[in-house]
Amino acid sequence: MNVTEAQARLSKLINQDSFAISRHGKIVGIYLSRDRIEALIETMELLSNPKFAKTLKDYEFGRMKFYDAADLGKAMSA
């Protein structure tokens, strides 16, 4: 939305998770809610952890085993 629209609707917009503001068709600002920012920070922290990054790659390449919750106890004791 453009700057004028954002100014007129700001009190309603801040209830959204995120939105972009444009001027002359180009984005000049972005609003991110506190929850969105915290989620981004958490994601960056996780991705900077080498053990997590390896686990994520293993998941993406199908190199992980998944168990039913009922069978998990058996798998953990094996």
Image: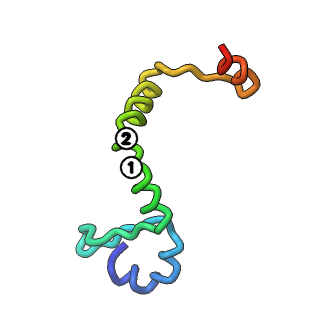
Q: How many marks?
A: 2
List the residue tagged with mark 1. 45
**Quarter of the rendering containing residue 51:** top left
What's under tag 2, amino acid-wise? Answer: Asn
Q: How is the image coloured?
A: rainbow
Q: Are marks 1 and 2 in contact (CB under 8 Å)?
A: yes
Distance between the Cα atoms at labels 1 and 2?
7 Å
Task: Examine the rendered structure and indicate whether residue 7 appears above or below residue 62.
Answer: below
Q: Position of residue 60 (x, y in %)?
A: 43, 27
What's under tag 1, amino acid-wise? Answer: Glu
**In the current view of this chain or complex, which residue is farthest to the top?**
78
**Quarter of the rendering containing residue 5:** bottom left
Q: Position of residue 32 (x, y in %)?
A: 41, 67
* Quadrant the N terminus occupies: bottom left
Task: Examine the rendered structure and indicate whether residue 39 appears above or below residue 16.
Answer: above
Task: Examine the rendered structure and indicate whether residue 48 appears above or below residue 54.
Answer: below
User: What residue do we see at 43% from left, 25% from top?
Assistant: 58
Left or right: residue 60 versus residue 22 is right
User: What residue do we see at 65% from left, 13% from top?
Assistant: 78
Looking at the rendered structure, which numbered label has been put on residue 49? 2
Q: Secondary structure at mark 2?
A: loop
Tell me if mark 2 has few (under 14), some (14-19) or many (20+) residues whose alpha carbon lies within 10 angstroms of its own.
Answer: few
Q: Position of residue 76 (x, y in %)?
A: 65, 21
**In the current view of this chain or complex, which residue is farthest to the bottom?**
8
Tell me if mark 1 has few (under 14), some (14-19) or many (20+) residues whose alpha carbon lies within 10 angstroms of its own.
Answer: few
Looking at the rendered structure, which numbered label has been put on residue 18? none
Left or right: residue 25 versus residue 35 is left
User: What residue do we see at 69% from left, 24% from top?
Assistant: 72
Q: Position of residue 27 (x, y in %)?
A: 27, 67
Q: Secondary structure at mark 1?
A: helix
**In the current view of this chain or complex, which residue is farthest to the right?**
70
